[in-house]
Every structure is written in structure tokens, then in C-alpha cells.
Amino acid sequence: MKMIKKLFKNEEGATAIEYGLIAALIAVAAIVAMGQLGNNLENTFNEVNNGLEQ
């Protein structure tokens, strides 16, 4: 009986899952931010290229 209570009391697995979810959320936010930065850089280089061609 004590072992069953101990298993339900153990929260290490839940904490690990929470850290994993936080890491995944940060990764998704970083991917979105980097994608937007890439688009902005592409637009800037295209503007420079068009300015040099004229």
C-alpha cells in the first residue's frame, strides 16, 4: 500500500513532461521568429539588388 501511495506522490515524471513542453514551446517560437527574420533579410537583399541594377 505504501508503494502505491509513493507512486502517486512522485511528481518527477510530471515535472520532466512540463520542462519538455516548455522547451517545445520555446523551439516553436524560435522557429517562427527566425523564419520572419529570414523573410525580412530576403526583402532587404532584394531591395539592395534592385537598387544596384538601376
Image (cartoon, rainbow, N blue to C red):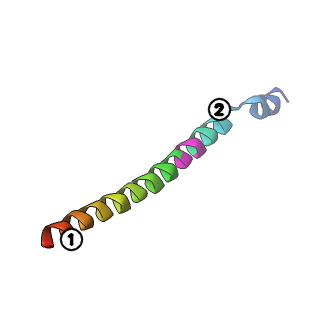
Indicate the position of residue 14 as horizontal and vertical percent values: 68, 38
Task: Describe the element under mark 1 as helix, strand or loop.
Answer: helix
Circle 1 residue: 50
Pick the front one: 47 or 23:
47
Indicate the position of residue 13 as horizontal and vertical percent values: 65, 38
Residue 41 position by quadrant: bottom left
Pick the front one: 35 or 39:
39
Circle 2 residue: 12
- Direction from residue 43 to residue 29 in the image, left or right: right
Vertical placement of 39 versus 22: above or below?
below
Vertical placement of 22 versus 39: above or below?
above
The residue depicted at 64 percent of the width and 35 percent of the height is: 15
Task: Describe the element under mark 2 as helix, strand or loop.
Answer: helix
The range drawn in magenta is 21-25
Pick the front one: 33 or 8:
33
Q: Quadrant of the C terminus?
A: bottom left
Indicate the position of residue 23 as horizontal and vertical percent values: 52, 43
Q: Earlier in the sequence, mark 1 or mark 2?
A: 2
Vertical placement of 35 versus 15: above or below?
below
34 part of magenta stretch: no
Mark 2 burial class by Cα count in 10 Å: few <14, some 14-19, many 20+ = few
The residue depicted at 41 percent of the width and 59 percent of the height is: 35
Whether tag 1 and tag 2 are in contact, CB under 8 A, the answer is no
- Label 2 amino acid? Glu
- Direction from residue 43 to residue 49 in the image, left or right: left
Mark 1 burial class by Cα count in 10 Å: few <14, some 14-19, many 20+ = few
Indicate the position of residue 24 as horizontal and vertical percent values: 53, 48
Pick the front one: 7 or 53:
53
Residue 4 position by quadrant: top right
The residue depicted at 77 percent of the width and 29 percent of the height is: 9
* Labels 1, 2: front one: 1
- Label 1 amino acid? Asn
